[in-house]
Amino acid sequence: MSDIPAFHELFGDVLNDFDISISYLDSRRTLYCEKSHRVTDEKFILSICGRKIDIECSGEKSAFYALCDVAKRLSENRMCDGEYVCSPSFSVRGYIEGFYGTPWSHENRKSVMALMAKNRMNTVYYAPKDDLYHREKWREKYPEKELTKLKELVVTSKKYYMDFYWCIAPGLSMKYSDNDEFNALIEKTKQLYSIGITSFGLLLDDIDEELEFEEDKVCYGETVNAHIDLINRYYAELKELDSSVKLNVCPTLYHGKGNEYYISKLGQNIPPRVSVFWTGRDICSRELTSFEALKFIECTHHKPLYWDNYPVNDCSMYNEMHISPIINRDADLWKYSEGIISNCMEYAECSKIPLITFADFLWDSENYDSQFSWENAIKQVIGEKYADAFTVFADHLYTSCLKDANSRRMYEALDKIESAFKAGDMQKAISLSEEYLGKMSACKEFLMKDLPICRELSKWSEKFYVFCDLTEKIFEYIKSKDDSLKEKIFSLIDKYNTMPARLSNDTDIKSELKNLFAAVN
């Protein structure tokens, strides 16, 4: 373990009580994934016998993942004797800072990267829409201060065995037929290459579908031809710079059936080793299916690299907080895609919870349990002590494109209380209501702490406090039948209705509380 410093940095002495040996072997046993029929440097074999653990792997990266796996088993009480042959389902497993809104702080970037490394993601994309030098000032080189921070991220990513992609988005203002514009793109790229970046993203999303400049219209006729030429020239220059350089492209048409004219022509006319981002059927897709991926491959001659717009909550979703686990991605999608890159929220701490569930799914999609993964993610981010309290609140934050069941724990609790009341068992109804109010009180106490994640959630927690007050007053009315409480209850309902933050399905919550209230009248 002494030659895997990243593990000690991230996990400390958690495995100090174990006798662990690591053997590096350059062989089929340690390099070849029989399931996917691919050679990978991420495979490892664990042999566990009590506190003696033998690891066979091909190099430091797979040794790091093996140690992460042991730590994960230990934290989840899954340490069982036996031999375990492990390798990831998806080749590319990562996240992108690609949202509209305030970019993450430098410390947030390092914090998220460290946590995702612990959970065996292997790719990070830098592409904040509101980084001026990424989009608006794409021609201008980074000032020294910003460049130094980027270099630190690159060094950190290498330490954590992660590929760091720097992305540029010139499409809003670039004149494709102007060589000076192309040269500016290359010079900007060389600046980033000089600090150790060898993976690049060329983003042509969220721009006009029609060419803006007359010179481009004369030269290319239509947008797709301009983009094909730009991608091919850019990739050729990158390969001239360094044969190991990788390029990923986000097309202007990045969602749909995969058989549309633009994406079909683009895919068939750019190099096969250039990766292509795709969000699925929709911009924010409820599901990603293998059938749709096969159609994309057939039409574009590329496997899709999914830019998954979850948990991002920008633009029209700004009143939602996406904190639930990832669901509705086909378990065998790894066969028909390069991988999945999750687009984060501007709320870095909150993004960590769904990102951990992404990491679990991408590592072992066939055995992924969304609820188990989500509960474990909350424990990682919040800590064991406050995990149960936080879950009471997080239960209300399932509103998203995934359309998962909302507020299940709340509905179960309220249904039991209502059933007890209707059955005439007032003592049980009161006991159940006091139990639920106790959980809500513990949750409020946690949310009021001066912690980064609590500050990020303030918009939603303020509405949750009103919901808590409302629930408390309804339960108080159930016990006392004091009609003077009715005015307060209706006032709280009105206040709740006027608050813009989304708490799960607000209509269902209000309906549930009204049913409970009506049951005692």
Image (cartoon, helix red, strand yellow):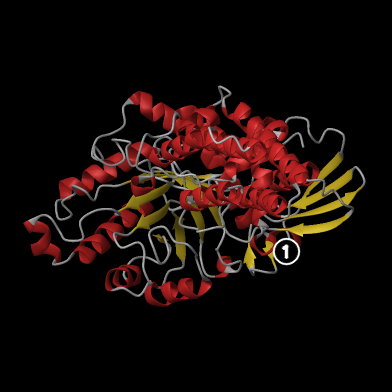
Q: State the image coordinates of residue 123 (x, y, percent, origin top left).
A: 52, 48
Q: Eyeballing the image, is 121 above or below 261?
A: above
Q: Closer to the camera, 409 or 49?
A: 409
Q: Nearer the viewer, residue 175 or 179?
A: 175
Task: Please identify the quadrant where the N terminus is shown.
Answer: top right
Instruction: Name the one closer to the observer, 149 or 458.
Output: 458
Circle 1 Cα neighbour tier, 10 Å, few/some/many (<14 / 14–19 / ≥20): few
- Say if residue 263 shows up in the picture: yes
Residue 398 pos. (x, y %): 53, 50
Residue found 53% across the figure and 32% down from its top:
484
Amino acid carrying label 1: it is Arg
User: Which secondary structure, mark 1?
Assistant: helix
**Residue 475 placement (x, y as % from top left):** 63, 39
Q: Is residue 41 visible?
A: no
Q: For residue 45, which quarter of the picture?
A: bottom right
The structure residue drawn at horizontal position 55% and vertical position 63%, both measured from the top left corner, is 328
Residue 508 appears left or right of 446: left
Residue bearing mark 1 = 28
Residue 283 placement, left or right of 106: left
The image shows residue 48 at horizontal and vertical percentages of 87, 50
Q: How many marks?
A: 1
Q: Quadrant of residue 282?
A: bottom left
Residue ranking furthest to the right: 50
